[in-house]
Amino acid sequence: MAQATDTLKDTATLEVRGLRVEVQGKEILKGIDLVVPQGEVHAIMGPNGSGKSTLANVIMGRPGYTVTAGEVLFKGQSIMSLKPDQRAQLGLFLAFQYPTEIPGVSVVNFLRSAYNAVKGDQISALAFRKRMKEKMTMLGVEDAMVARYVNQGFSGGEKKKNEILQLAVLEPEIAILDETDSGLDIDSLKAVANGIQQLIGPNLGVLLITHYQRILNYITPDRIHVMMDGRIVLSGGPELAVRLEQQGYEGVRKELGIELERAGDKTAKGETR
């Protein structure tokens, strides 16, 4: 065990151990174990209400969740006591399912401020523009988009493309993409997926959260984990996506003999996605 821990310290590995989480007194995550190494793409799939977004938010340190057991480690150290900005400085990134509008702040100014905060650098405006332009060219982002206020008046596809531009500029070691395909038409989905595919490589590990198989037509994960009722109930290779497409989540649940808890107290909208 000591040898395994030493190995994790040498790599940018995200590790979740026995994580149990409550929201407003209701248990949402019921013992999650997960390891995502830098350089690999892992997909978490599951129906709405299974706890996927809760897992993403807890990993990134969003307030409002009560961790009752377990821990989250990154690069071999616990990050449970760190604030979200400190986790970002370590090399973690979260792309939101519902990106927030920031009126009065242009995308370019927002990205430069985020870069300075995460990297601890005070890069000049000229140097940053050059860096950002390289990423924009790679992702096919137009100049007009970065001059606009962050997500204000953006289409669903533009909001998600802006999240991927942030990912490209900040260059984290592990990126959590929370339902990046949500609400996208087929053309926007292709554009966003192609952007993610451009960034995937040995320096970036990705935890891709989705309940649709369609984004996996463009991004092939190394591992797929199926999440139901706050637990990972099945893991496998890319072929698992085909099985889910054929059987659906209900078919897999019945095959595994999993009894879901009856609906009881409701949590806030979106908390258990």
Image (cartoon, rainbow, N blue to C red):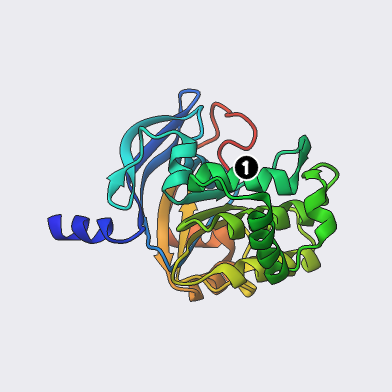
Q: Position of residue 256 (x, y in %)?
A: 42, 60
Nearer the observer, 259 or 225:
225
Q: Is residue 226 above or below residue 239?
A: above
Say which residue appears at 70% left-offset and 67% top-offset. Answer: 139
Image quadrant in which you'd find residue 244: bottom right
Graded by Cα atoms within 10 Å as few (under 14), some (14 to 19) or many (20 or more), the crowding at tag 1 reads some
- Please tell me which residue lies in front, 213 or 55: 55
What is the number of callouts on the image? 1
* Tag 1: amino acid: Ser
SS at mark 1? Answer: helix
Tell me: 258 left or right of 198.
left
Q: Which residue has dot 1 on it?
A: 113
State the image coordinates of residue 130 (x, y, percent, origin top left).
67, 62
> Based on the displayed image, in which of its 4 quarters is residue 46 positioned?
bottom right
**Measured from the top left, where is residue 151 in percent x and y?**
77, 44
Q: Nearer the viewer, residue 78 or 127?
A: 127
